[in-house]
Image (cartoon, rainbow, N blue to C red):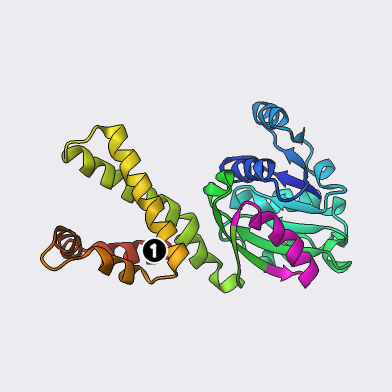
Amino acid sequence: MKVTIIGAGAMGGTTAEGLLKQKEIDIELTVSDPVASTRTRFEQLGAKVTADNADAAKGADVVMVVVKPWLVEQVLKGIAPALSPEQNLVVIAAGVRSDSIKAWLASSPLLSGGGALLLAIPNIAIAQLASMTFLVPVEANERQTAQVKSLFDATGNTLLTDEQHLAAGTTLASCGIAYAMRYIRAASEGGVELGFKADDAKRIVMQTVEGAVRLLESTGMHPEQAIDLVTTPGGVTIKGLNEMEHAGFTSSVIRGLKAGLK
């Protein structure tokens, strides 16, 4: 499959890294970026590189536009003539609406000829093949959707959703990875206060978080069921949990997530 990524900044770059690392799909990856050092880096990783967005888009099965939201219009209008009805266009940019994208592509044969338009929001763990990606088929049939979804499935977990829920998905998983990092940082600092060296504390917390995830995945338990396994009457775990709740732990998490939608 020929895949082009236009824009190799933080999100585009990690997406490119993930696609180059995955082994499930045979991909010929092209990366287009204006920064010479970025192009050199991805060329060394095995991608074809260019600074010409329109040239990069030609002939690709899937074209991913991964630039800052305020640059999406400029980039799409620039590549519109190069897009064909045989292609799948994926726009990865938080807050950019599909009706705006369609307007910017009005002069392109992509949509008028039956090409696909999808919106996607991965998170930065895509570079480690561990992304939670939300995918919205705006103008795409089942075959086109499946082709694009296969790319994100190869780099993590993918949820098909609608545009209405994309912002919520962004704050839950894309912003959410930062929230998870903040917990790891806080718990690591607590570990230092408990007497562990900083690196040891971080390693302990990371393994604990990974273990919690694997436990839930393997058993299908609700988190509260798993919590009950380690909260003995009068024990230290329930005391610690209650102290965190007194400080507003659950409420703070929910309020932080909802703030991302404001």
Q: Position of residue 126 (x, y in %)?
A: 58, 48
Q: Quadrant of residue 256?
A: bottom left
Prevailing secondary structure of the magenta residues = helix
x, y (%) of residue 149? 69, 61
- Quadrant of the frame with the C terminus: bottom left
Viewer-closest of 208 and 187: 208
Magenta-colored stretch includes residue 153: yes
The residue that label 1 is drawn on is 257
As helix, strand or loop, the secondary structure at mark 1 comes to helix
> Left or right of 48: which side holds 123?
left
Give left or right: position of 224 versus 131. Answer: left
Say whether residue 50 is visible: no
Tag count:
1
Say which of 207 and 129 sits in front: 207
Q: Which residues are magenta?
A: 137-156
Which residue is at the far left?
234
Type of amino acid at the residue the image marks with label 1: Leu
Q: Is residue 36 above or below residue 188?
A: above
Up-down relation of residue 224 to residue 27 (above or below): below
* Residue 118 on image: x %, y %: 70, 63
Q: 17 above or below 166?
A: above
Q: Residue at x 82, y 44 (%)?
A: 54
Give the quarter of the image for residue 101: bottom right
Residue in the picture at 86% in, 47% down: 58
Q: 222 or 19: which is nearer to us?
A: 222
Q: Residue 211: x percent and y percent?
A: 39, 53
Q: Is residue 92 visible?
A: yes
Q: Is residue 84 above or below residue 198?
A: below
Which residue lies at the image location 34% right of the left edge and 50% below the top edge? 208
220 or 98: nearer the viewer: 220
